[in-house]
Image (spheres, rainbow, N blue to C red):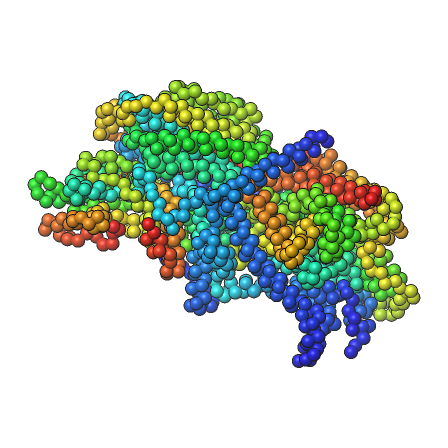
Amino acid sequence: MVTYFKEILTGFYSLLAGMAVTIKYFVKPIVTVQYPRQKLSMSPAYRGHTEFVLDLETGTHRCIACEMCARICPSQLITVEGVKIDPKKKVPRKYVIEYQYCSLCGLCVESCPTKALKFSEEYRLAGFSREDCVVDLLARLQAQQQRAGLAVTPRPEARREEGEAKPEGEVKG
Amino acid sequence: MNWLISLITPVGLASGAFIMVVAMTLLGALIAVAARNIFHNVLGLALCLIGVAGLFLYLNSPFVALMEILIYVGAICIAICFAIMLSAPMYLPLPPRHPLKILGALAGAGLVFAFLALLTKKTTWAAASVRSDDWSITTIGHYLLTDYVLIFEVISLLLVVAMLGAVVTARGGRGSS
Amino acid sequence: MHEPGQEEKTYVLNFGPQHPSTHGVLRVELQMEGEFITKAAPDIGYGHRGHEHMAENRNYQQFLPNMGRVDYLHALAYNQGYCMAVEKLTGLEVPERAEFIRVITAELNRIASHLLWVGAYLLDLGAFTPFLYCFDDRENILDLLDRVTGSRLTYCYYRFGGVPKDIDDEFMAGCRAFITRLRGRFKDYDDLVTKNIIFIKRTRDIGVISKEQCVRYGLTGPMVRGSGIPYDIRKSEPYSVYPRFDFEIPIGERGDIMDRYLVRIREMAQSLRIIEQALDKLPDGPIMAEKVPKRIKPAAGEVYQAVETARGEFGCYIVSEGDIKPYRIKLRVPSFGNLSILPEIAVDTLVADLVAILGSIDVVVPEIDR
Amino acid sequence: MESARMLVFNQLETYLYLALMLFAIGLYGVLARRNLIAVLISVELILNAASINFMAFNRFLAPTPAVGQVITLFIMAVAAAEAAIALSIIVAVYRKLRSVNIEQATELRG
Amino acid sequence: MDNLVRILGTDLGRMLAGLIGVIALVSVNALFLIWMERKVAAHMQLRPGPMEVGWHGAIQTIADALKLMGKELITPAEVDRSVYLLAPIVVFLPVLLSFLVIPFSQTLVIRDMNVGVLLILAFAALTVLAILMAGWASNNKYAVFGSIRSVAQNVAYEIPLLITVMSPILMVGSYRLTDIVAAQEKFWFIVSQPLAFILYITCATAETNRAPFDLPEAESELVAGFHTEYSGMRFGLFFLAEYTNMFIVAALATIFFLGGWRGPVLPGWVWFLLKVYAIIFLIMWFRWTFPRVRFDQLITFAWKILIPLAFANLLLTALVMKLM
Amino acid sequence: METKTGEPLIKIGLLEEALNLARANSLWPMTFGLACCAIEMMAAGAARFDLDRFGAGVFRPSPRQSDLMIVAGTISKKMAPAVVRLWEQMPAPKWVIAMGNCAISGGPFYYPTQYAIVPGADLIIPVDVYVPGCPPRPEGLIEGILHLEEKITKRGRLRKFRDVK
Amino acid sequence: MEIPEALRDFSYVLVFLVAAGLFALGPLIIAHLIAPRSFGAARDEIYECGMPILGGAWIQVAVIYYLFALLFLAFDVDVLFLFPVLLAYGKGYVWRDFIEIVIFIGILSLVIVYAWGRGVFTWKRKPENL
Ligand code: SF4
Ligand code: SF4
Ligand code: SF4
């Protein structure tokens, strides 16, 4: 009998204690970030998709189209096509990542001999089709240059025998 | 226009409602006996009982009417449902009885009905000469506490015994054979 | 039409794969008698992504990102296990500072995992609010980890021979702030959850696992510690720099759900202690071994390395044939072993208890299915 | 304007006939159905018919209306007890025979 | 024509006016309660809740309602059609009916019946029946489970609820709701019947299937319980009934224990609504604090603790009344 | 894949627009997680990000009551029929968000000898919005929901939010 | 002409019941009209966590539910009698009515005591003889 009532009382008390906690938080300020109304700053290490480092000294990227990144990438999602603009220097004519396969491992960034890659801070990537996820790094770089008021790195002309002069259609910049 | 308005006078409403109640009662009763699915039977019973509760209202006793709903719909129907679920295949319709038997049942019920109806018609009902007009719940309580106190207590005893019996019967099943 | 005997067919209830409390895509096929379960057969494979198969197609580095996805809740321990196995295979030395960073981040991750478990578990039990509080705390950890690893969930942070990114002062300050914060929060959890009579009633003496059962099924982690066996790889086969820290292995007495819950809660406190000590003792120095070859090409051989994850013992077994690709990687995952006891302890319980028991096992489905 | 007595729902006979119909329907159910529970439901109908009768007499004839209501309440209580017992028996029969067929239930001996 | 005037002046007018008022109240109340629930929950969980749809999410629930309206109604092939379709309607009947007798203020009551309390309590049985119908007809294992549990639970809580409200009634000696409020002239019954109040709130929470007694809809166990198979507006009706039910039990609590419309300065109905929403807040507070009780514990709790306590309280009240 | 939907019996422009507006602002997702991304989906519903702000925080466990299926995680071949079944059991109008690289294309698990997964939810059910990332951050999911709103109402707040600095 | 009070009450009840039915029906009809339709092989299948269903849904419930229903029945009847008694209580019966109620409730409580003793309230998988 005593235990019966004791259990009721302690139980009742424990419930009250719980309610005290929730009401305490009820009056506390909220922790929600008002995301779309307020732009978020990502942490410095944040990994969005990869993008070219805009080298402020040269005003362009540092990629030498060595394809190290493409080779190490676990998902083999990087397509690099280089052209030789002069005997010693090779630049990418096309650098496209199919972001929808990426696992954000960072191997490409780390393996790049010229440190030409970095992770972008882009997190708003939703799209209406699979193709929306494909990112053209060169186009992206150009946009970046434009925003910074720098000279835009032109897309190197393909050597004539290779044909196609234009990069593939809608890619996100 | 006028007859329409007269339909929505209190009397008109009451008459219309009465027809609804009667329809509910009879429809419910028919579903309760005729539907093949046992669960529909229970629902029919519930409908019928709500109708009966309505009749009780017309008989001037809202208390009994509400208690009808509380006890029959709220408790008995629920108990029946659980009993059905307890015996898993009960919801499956059984093959109907031989048509002859059904006919027999119909005839039997019809005969009884005719006989009693005749009897009712023949009888003249006489009201008691002095009639009190006290329908209040308090008076019911008063009677329960005074004149019918024995029954009042016996009912509780009856319930206890019935429950004990029911519990024992329901529990001793498979194992105790 | 009803025939006698027809109703004797067993009553089978699909529990999952899409069910709010199977945490992903586990399916448990229940045979029931009334409300009671007579047989619970987990059906796994709904989350099978072929992790182990993948290892045979990739070289050592390329397999690394998968480790964060086997058990995404305690991804860093998996990172650690795999890296340590490869380091063992190749004889790479990890600098001390890197080891410390690994310990700090892995322990943070462990707390995050436990917090998520507490929250999700209470969600299973029907309490929504603690879930949000846990997530709130967890977000703080994620912020910290995001700072160093760049991701919130499927970390791919450790590298063979160290870590690629050093921690900064802000991180350390954040860590310390978090430690104080979480310690303060424990009281709220106590009031809200641990002492709550409903919670106690739901978890005491439910899903009891005896010591003998633990051994028989090869349970690890909080499951085995909840039953009173102080088995924790960090103590019993110390790795990394764990021996340098002073921490305890909390154990339960009765082996019921409550004990498992308490073990996890206390483990969080212990992890906080470890982090605190590691922050204090953090040495300076490099974070990457000197000469890490560009291509990992270990000599033929095999190696097994176990680490303690939030769910128990994760073992990474690598067979190398001297190629740049491993010949075979076998992952010994704790959830698989832990889940295996479910059919035994779920029998004769109610569905509600099954939810509680399943939750207390803390399974991560892709980990089971690898 | 018609007088109150003329209204259908103010006449004793209406209720008597209604109760009779309910009774007949219940009787039919008892005779025709094979399912024990259906039989029980029919019995409930018959009991309700009785209640209606009681209440009707009470309304139109009895000297003290409260007594009739008390009696009806008692009928309800007894009906409840009856239902409980009957259901339990049905459940027991079901467990014994794995059937709720009344014809099989008659085989229940000893 | 004067016929019409006369009618409108009497019952019919009252009926129609009441009906319109109640339907408006039910709709607005449900919209408001759902919004309130989401806001209360959100703030207890350190988040803002609906924000973007209207000012602070004010028209969020209207959007929800409209959306539900425009949602396909799926009737699965193997359901018991007629019963399946009927259940959401039946669940709604007792809900609307209860408003008939609830006094919002001294005069603001549609029909002040002398069996008011009984009307509400008796028709609550229909809710149970509707839930049983829904679950049974759905032919879905989770729904069947949910409905059985729901019924067993409601049935278990009906008794202590009935017995608990008997104590104030014993003190008042009437089933008329206005009489009960009138009797609280000197003090609210929560003062003299604190135990009854606690018991009532407990039972009411269980009656309305709210956490920690939300077994029938226990997400983590039974998916969505008895309405698992109901889509669109049919589900919406269950939702609506649930929230309106909440209003009703809170209104009863107000009438029985908090002195109904009594209060200084403000008009009666404002006080009434304030008290009702305070009780509802309490019930919401429960929901967002406690874990769910296990089903058997719940039933056992009702029989082992609530009913004995309720009986004890009743007898105590009776005894005190004799002594005084 | 195209969503097959029967037209309603009555379709009036204005009504349809109002309905669409309501639908877009009341997207109840189904409680349905497949792998890692599900955790981020939970996080999106939690205090920090609070999907409920957009009216999309009412997670319904039953497909019958949900409008939105968030495919969060890897669809294994074994799971695929269940996904399709669940999708089919949702009442119209319904939408699908493929959350995470796995749901979009198989993600990191898509490689030549892969045998176990369905490379992309859009191979089995019609997908409306793709949210890449591994896992996408909760912001990403919110972004996806805003995209979906835009798709439903054919206008939206997306642009407005885009310019927020 | 005079209509009894109870009947007037009742007309309210009936009107409200009908109105409630219509009120509930309205949105359903509207929904039927304005909602689009979906197609799919599994649309009309019963939901069970995304799996094809195995076996029927009709569960054989535990006997315990039935026992609870019976207990409920007993107490409901008990309440039925208490309702009128409450109103009459204290109207000058000195102690008689109190004692009668105590006896009444006391006898009924035996059911609880018995059930408690028999272990009806403790759920075991197989209560003896299930
Ligand atoms: S982050 Fe990893 S997966 Fe992504 S592109 Fe770079 S190497 Fe490939
Ligand atoms: S990004 Fe770096 S690794 Fe890749 S092709 Fe360019 S230079 Fe080589
Ligand atoms: S996309 Fe990445 S995080 Fe999402 S389920 Fe796939 S592997 Fe996991």
**The C terminus of chain G lies in which quarter of the figure?**
top right
Q: Position of residue C346 (x, y in %)?
A: 55, 34
Looking at the image, residue B107 lies above or below residue B77: below
The residue at the point 82 percent across, 55 percent down is B138
Residue A127 seen in the figure: yes
Residue placed furthest toward the left: A87
**Left or right: G39, with B16 as reference point:** left
The N terminus of chain G sits in image quarter: bottom right
Q: Quadrant of ligand 2?
A: top left
Return the residue nearer the eye: G11 or B25. G11
Q: Nearer the viewer, residue C228 or B44?
A: C228
> Left or right: E31 with respect to C82?
right
> Where in the figure is residue E68, as x and y percent of width and height?
50, 58
Q: From the viewer's perspective, tell me whether residue C280 is left or right of residue E32.
A: left
Q: Is residue E196 above or below residue C270?
A: below
Residue at the (27%, 25%) spot, across then down: C286
Please indicate whether residue B41 sits to the left or right of residue A49 in the image: right
Residue C251 x %, y %: 51, 24
In the picture as drawn, the residue positioned furthest to the front comes out as E265
- Extreme residue toward the right, this view: B129
Percent across and percent down for residue E10 are 71, 70
- Tell me if I can see residue A65 in this picture: no
Residue sitting nearer the eye, F29 or E275: E275
Say if A154 sits above or below D13 in the image. above
Instruction: Identify the image quadrant of residue B165.
Output: top right
Q: Report the residue at 13% width, 45% height from top.
A: A83
